[in-house]
Amino acid sequence: MSIFTALNLEREPFSTSPDPSFFYHSKEHYTALNRLEIAIRLKRGLSLVLGDVGTGKTTLSRALFQSFAGEEKDYIFHMILTPSFKSEYQFLAHLTKLFGISPFFRSVIDHREAIEKYLFTKCVEEQKTVVLLIDEGQKLTLPQLEILRTLLNYETNEYKLLQLVILGQMELLPRIKNIRNFMDRISFKYILNPLDEYETGQMIEFRLRQAGYNADKKLFTFEAVRKIHQSTQGYPRQISRICHNVIEYLISENGEVVTAEIIDQIITREKIWN
């Protein structure tokens, strides 16, 4: 029997793993996801999504992948989770490997030409759309950003060959502004902000329902939600972390409802470790 059964849950509702099935579509997240999809389908080139740590950028990227499910024959997705490369050559070598290009090349120029040929073959001759999604974009160095800028130069008269989506923290913005002709290549740019109190409650409710909770009564009181929002300032990752600890508390204490007092206890416990 699952430990969640006592709470009418089928599985963990507040894991911090980027599971797209638990992706709560706040107004901002819905807008970002919808416009990213449009930019890719219209082959506009570069899209940039920025936000502080814990605003849901990684989960947004997984949801973007899912929105193209069933269209694998037309859309080829590649992803870089953490762009930690020591040199321009290493970055290009990783891209050629990621794209499945062979044989291995020894020079930067050879890698560039191979990538250009790959994009032309896939996007023009085979009529496919190649998407490169880079998470943790704030780790991109200036030379790596220059490489990406160059790749965005590959185009037909009608569209960009590479659809590039970069998600990163706000510190990436000033670095991009220092690169000539990079900002004007961004077809879609968006900043993700934290949730307000109402959306915090909606996110909690949504994730509970996704985990199988079907009781008529609210598991979290309005006062508990207010406390959670005040403590987390509406950052989805922080909301999930506190709620995960709350669920563990309810299970261990045979609790049935989450009150503001329980939230206070959880927050106090967390402060000891911070």
Image (cartoon, rainbow, N blue to C red):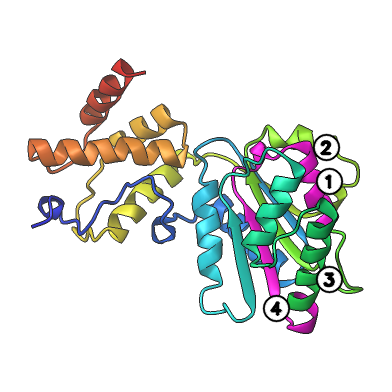
Residues at discs 2 and 3 in contact (Cβ within 8 Å): no
- Indicate whether 41 appears above or below 266: below
Secondary structure, mark 3, is loop
Residue 51 visible in image: yes
Amino acid, disc 4:
Lys
Amino acid, disc 1:
Met
Measure how far apart labels 1 and 2 are at the Cα level: 6 Å
Q: Report the magenta residues as a range.
A: 123-151
The residue lying at 72 percent from left, 55 percent from top is 47
Measure how far apart labels 1 and 4 are at the Cα level: 26 Å
* Nearer-N-terminus badge (2/3): 3
Measure how far apart labels 1 and 3 are at the Cα level: 18 Å
Q: Which residue is mark 2?
A: 177
Measure how far apart labels 4 and 3 are at the Cα level: 12 Å
Secondary structure, mark 1, is helix
Q: Where residue 183 is drawn, which disc sits there?
A: 1
Few, some or many C-alpha atoms within 10 Å of disc 3 (few <14, some 14-19, many ≥20)?
some
Q: Which residue is mark 4?
A: 128
Residues at discs 1 and 2 in contact (Cβ within 8 Å): yes
Q: Report x, y in % for residue 26.
A: 50, 52
Few, some or many C-alpha atoms within 10 Å of disc 1 (few <14, some 14-19, many ≥20)?
some
Quarter placement of the C terminus: top left
Amino acid, disc 3:
Tyr
Secondary structure, mark 4, is loop
Measure how far apart labels 4 and 2 are at the Cα level: 31 Å
The residue lying at 79 percent from left, 68 percent from top is 161
In the rendered structure, the answer to whether residue 197 lies left or right of residue 6 reads right
| Front in this rendered view, residue 44 or 260 | 44
Q: Which residue is mark 3?
A: 159
